[in-house]
Amino acid sequence: MRNICRNYMKPITCLAFCLAVICNLHAQRFGGNAPSMKWQQVNNDAARVIFPEGMDSSAARIAAIEAMLSKTTLPTIGSSQQKINIVLHPNTIISNGYVALGPFRSEFYMTPAQNSFELGSLRWQDMLAIHEYRHVQQYNNFNIGLSHAFRILFGQEGQELANALAIPNWFWEGDAVFQETLVSPQGRGRLPFFFDDYRSLWITGRNYSYMKLRNGSLRDFTPDHYRLGYMMVAYGREKYGDDFWRKVTHDAASFKGLFYPFQKAVKQYAGKNFTAFTKDAFDYFKNQSAGAQPGAEKHKHFVADQEFPAYTNTGSIIYVKTSYKKLPSFIEKTGESERVIRVKDVSTDNQLSYKNGKIVYASYRTAARWGWNDYNELQVLDIQTGIQKTITRKSKYFSPDLSDDGRFIVAVDVQPGRQSVLHVLDAETGAVIKVIPNPGNLFYTYPKFISDKQLVAAIRKPSGEMALALINSNDGRTSYLTAPGYRVMGNPAVLNDTVYFSAASEGYDRLFAVTLSDRKLYRLSVPAKGIGAYQPSVTGNSIVFTTFTANGYRLQEESKMSIGWDPVSSDQWQQPIGTFNIDLTKNKAAGLLTGVPPAEGLPVKKYSQLTGLFNFHSLLPYVADPDYKLSLVGNNILNTMQSELYAAYNRNEGYKQAGANFTYGGLFPYINLGASYIFDRRGFFQTQPVYWNESQLNAGLSVPLNLSKGRSIINLTMGADYVFKNITYTSQFYKDSLAKHNLPYQSHLGYVNGYISFTHQVQQARQHIYPRFAQSLYINYRNSVEAANPHQLLATGNFYFPGFALTHNIVASLAFQNRDTSSSYSFSNSFPFSRGYTVPSLRNMYKWGINYHLPLAYPDFGFGNMVYFQRVRANAFYDYTRAGEVAYRNGARTIELFRSTGVEIFFDTKWWNELPLNFGFRYSHLLDRDLYASQGAGAERFEFVLPVNLFQR
């Protein structure tokens, strides 16, 4: 749940690079809440919980859990404790949370997920509080040794970098998942789904290297670092005691041994090298995974995910298919043939319901301005015509289900700060026909129609226990088909008198059925072709479901005649679901959550949006030769103010610069303010050097809009600044030369800087270098408001199209720049000139280019836990620039061509098992003379490039 990179071990020399990368990885959304939101707070020694009005009880409970954890689980990671700011965000439909430094805070996304198999059924605020507070404890206790020195030098993000240098990301998340499992009656360490990934690799003999498991692959399925981390952490504590990781991470964060401190610490306290420790940890879990058999499909690499199957009246199967080369699409499968119905809209999951020729599902949509607000809108799709209709707008619906006749929809409605309720809607108009009461304060998942008077759903009680429940659609009264417990379940399917569903049992997720007439429960025995059984759909003769394999989620269809129906007694149902043999009872914090004290006695106070507005937290270096900058940066906890004080140096001109920038995002539009002073700028006048100082003030407004909807991701930013510059010439040459030409010793310039940035793209599959259809447009106009009237217009565009293969791209680029011919002032030049040439700034410049991008190889290779190569790709290009200028002496207009062609080879890599870096080499052949290059420069140019791509993954 953390959105911050952690790394294994890196040389200290990567300091500036790592800091720059980490700054861009935080998940905080700038200015994401409307100014009308009223904020409140509750406080104790462990946390300040900041929340919108109406969430008092949730905030108090979170504060109580953090206080309890601060006294019980802290010793297993250290002894230091610092109070954390926690911000609750109820308006986003995303289920997530994270902790970050810079500034030190935590953000909780308060809407629970529908899928209980993945994250469990605990009350969502409890889950967030337990997991994220472990990250708080980690940060507080990793501020030691060399990590502490980094914090002194560079602030909070200096510590963040140092911790990233020393401790791998899998430990952060694995340790937090272990805390979930330790202190609660559930946690992901008890969920079979959490281990499907590794089990699927083990049963097919895919023994990937540690580096491949750490870095992932673009052609093979690899589990994420949460799974890896839990197994490593759980094994370490089981084998070497609860203080093992405290000692390891203390030494690692202190950089004892300096290089590879984490591996050295593991060897110190485990008595074996890190490679042997990793093997033993995998073997410990692998040896307990007997029972599942390899699937029938045999493929070398990932094939595709096939999810949420549904039978049609003709016996064909509807489902969602996603591959590494293709976007998620609705598929109709008849026999062995597949028909694409339609590419799916952007969605938070792949759930669908099919009845009577129609599909209903929920698609994701953002609010245009406020980033912490988004929606799930219901879509109804006709499978014959492929025509889709949006029937609700700005709604927050989950897991919709169509009635048998296709006239009605039932969906879970989750509004901010309220209990979940079931809505019955008209499938044609989206009008709400009925709101079903929720007297038991239950959380509903995957509701299904049984009749117009009765529904079935997998429900979560406030305690976190789950049950399969019948719901009266008139008054919301609920009766349980299964006894409540911490056994996760979901995906019910109804046929006649029987409800089929998936639930955890004996270490795996399996299929069950319950008959409504006598409420007898059965476990369905089916041949194992993968790990787990999910999302069943049934007919009179067959059942189809999804099972997990190393090649993706795959459909498995079986005849009902081949299925065993094994009765399940109430005693059997109450047994623990079981996964792996990790003894948690020896720790005094085991099961602690069930004893959370009442969250009372914490006064609720107002929290002003202006609190800590100028909150400087980090000192960050930026290097982009020839520019070097050191910035003191700040953000307030609500992230409505970004502040920067900086000092800079330009190596080309030798000038020094000091300045400040401030952006306030708590209003609409953003307010931007800045000031700077440049010492000793250098230029030329009639071949003679000229020196001057330059001061600048700027103020402006900007409007960032997220217009994403359907299958498109759209962003539009518009803004304008007024800039005032004052220029003072300082050299003796002024007296000797400039004054003779009646040029003033001191001058000033005021101009307006306006800009528009627009991007549109379709979704991007894993192996796509760029989206198969996208546009990026940027227009910048700077114009003086004074008599001298310098001006400059720049317009650029990039257009992305499919290539000849699914993973190829054709990218066309266009650009135009026009500026004045006066010598009073020259604006900076950002024109994308033909590659290979020395770049001038001429009066009129036109450019077009064409690129063809394609992958060459997927090496999945690395060495020394330092660099890992995921992909090698190439680009063949042709650039055409036509530029005109007025000659200096005779006023004649000159037009020149600057054409080049060449090849670029890029390497998509990860450094130290975490930080993504794409770099490459460019060969350019110049078809025209380089007029601005040094004498003797040839037509062949070789460059090292670090591409910055709009759609870079």
Image: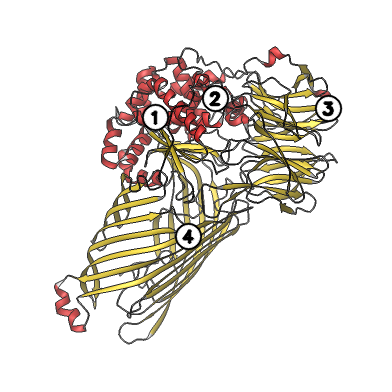
Residue 173 position (above or below residue 374):
above
Q: Which residue is mark 1?
A: 44
Task: Look at discs 1 and 4 and give the one toward the viewer.
Answer: 1
Tell which of 195 and 428 is nearer to you.
Answer: 428
Q: Residue at x 37, y 86 (%)?
A: 892
- Rounded to the nearest angstrom, the CA distance separating label 3 from label 2 is 34 Å
Q: Amino acid at mark 1?
A: Asn
Q: Secondary structure at mark 4?
A: strand
Q: Which residue is mark 4?
A: 703
Name the N-terminal-most of marks 4 and 3.
3
Task: Look at discs 1 and 3 and give the one toward the viewer.
Answer: 1
Q: Which residue is mark 3?
A: 497
By what rule are the colours in the image chosen?
secondary structure
> CB atoms at circles 1 and 4 under 8 Å apart?
no
Name the N-terminal-most of marks 1 and 3.
1
CA neighbours of label 3 inside 10 A, class few (<14), some (14 to 19), many (20+): few
101 on left or right of 183? left
Q: Amino acid at mark 3?
A: Asp
Tell which of 146 and 888 is nearer to you.
Answer: 146
Task: Look at discs 1 and 2 and give the one toward the viewer.
Answer: 1
The image quadrant of residue 324 is: top right
Q: Which residue is mark 2?
A: 187
- Rounded to the nearest angstrom, the CA distance separating label 1 from label 3 is 53 Å
- Rounded to the nearest angstrom, the CA distance separating label 1 from label 2 is 25 Å
> CB atoms at circles 2 and 4 under 8 Å apart?
no
Residue 490 makes an appearance in the image: no
Q: Secondary structure at mark 3?
A: loop
- Residue 260 location (% of width, % of height): 35, 30
